[in-house]
């Protein structure tokens, strides 16, 4: 079991460390810029080259059915789910087989609208509720993997 983190803009790194340590699960953060991480042997940082989707490609390739992936990137979530990984958004909402299709469709629709109009925006501001939901979701995902793995 392990946790992979799409770390460039991840607002819940501290929460990931806390839950992963409690469960005794290693964490790998992947980003295209250096960042400070705890000096623990169970935390690894992988710096990838600059470029579109390089970190995503690394995470997607490394993910597997005993991994939890933390990302806000819908297309990365889909790729990791295809490999059997549990994927949790940074707001704590897990991606599921039932939700990923509509999430990808909505992402594509919004991208198309931004191309042809002045539609802007983005996700709402990150809240305390999101942080709390994330802690709970990551704990539940790791507990489920432990149960399923015996």
Image (cartoon, rainbow, N blue to C red):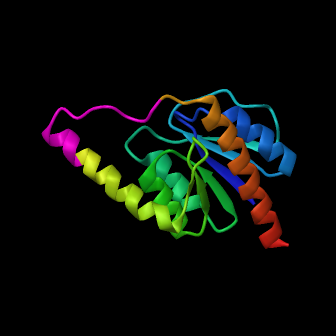
44 lies left or right of 93: right
* Residue 141: percent from left, percent from top: 71, 57
Q: Which residue is drawn at 61% across and 37% down?
A: 130
Asked if residue 109 is positioned above or below residue 33 in the image, the reply reads: below
Left or right: residue 46 compared with residue 145: left
Is residue 76 within the magenta segment?
Answer: no
Residue at the farthest left position: 116
51 with respect to 31 (left or right): left
Magenta segment, prevailing SS (helix, strand or loop): loop
Q: Is residue 128 above or below residue 74?
A: above
Q: Which of 130 and 85 is in front in this view?
A: 130
Q: Quadrant of the C terminus?
A: bottom right
State whether residue 42 appears in this view: no
Residue 42 lies in what quarter of the image?
Answer: top right
Q: In which quarter of the image is residue 135?
A: top right
Q: Give the range drawn in magenta.
A: 112-124
Residue ID at (57%, 35%): 10
Tell me if I can see residue 38 in this picture: yes
Residue 75 position, x and y percent, is 42, 55
Identify whether 61 is placed above or below 26.
Answer: below
Q: For the N terminus, give its image quadrant.
A: bottom right
Residue for point 62% across, 66% down: 64
The answer to whether 142 is drawn above or below residue 27 in the figure is below
| Residue positioned 33% across, 58% down in the render | 105
Q: Where residue 68 appears, x then y in whole percent? A: 66, 56
Residue 58, image x, y percentages: 52, 53
Q: Does the magenta stretch include residue 119?
A: yes
From the viewer's perspective, is 47 left or right of 23?
Answer: left
In-front residue for pair 45/92:
92
């Amino acid at each position: 079991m392990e946790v992979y983190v799409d770390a460039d803009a991840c607002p819940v790194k501290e929460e990931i460390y806390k839950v992963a340590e409690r469960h005794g699960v290693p964490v790998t953060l992947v980003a295209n810029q250096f960042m400070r991480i705890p000096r623990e042997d169970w935390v690894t940082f992988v710096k990838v080259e600059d470029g579109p989707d390089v970190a995503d490609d690394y995470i997607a390739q490394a993910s597997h059915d005993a991994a939890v992936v933390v990302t806000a990137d819908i297309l990365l979530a889909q790729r990791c789910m295809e490999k059997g990984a549990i994927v949790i958004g940074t707001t704590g909402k897990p991606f599921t087989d039932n939700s990923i299709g509509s999430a990808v469709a909505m992402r594509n629709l919004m991208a198309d609208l931004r191309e042809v109009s002045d539609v802007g925006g983005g996700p709402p501001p990150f809240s305390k509720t999101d942080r709390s939901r994330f802690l709970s979701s990551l704990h539940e995902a790791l507990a489920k993997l432990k149960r399923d793995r015996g």
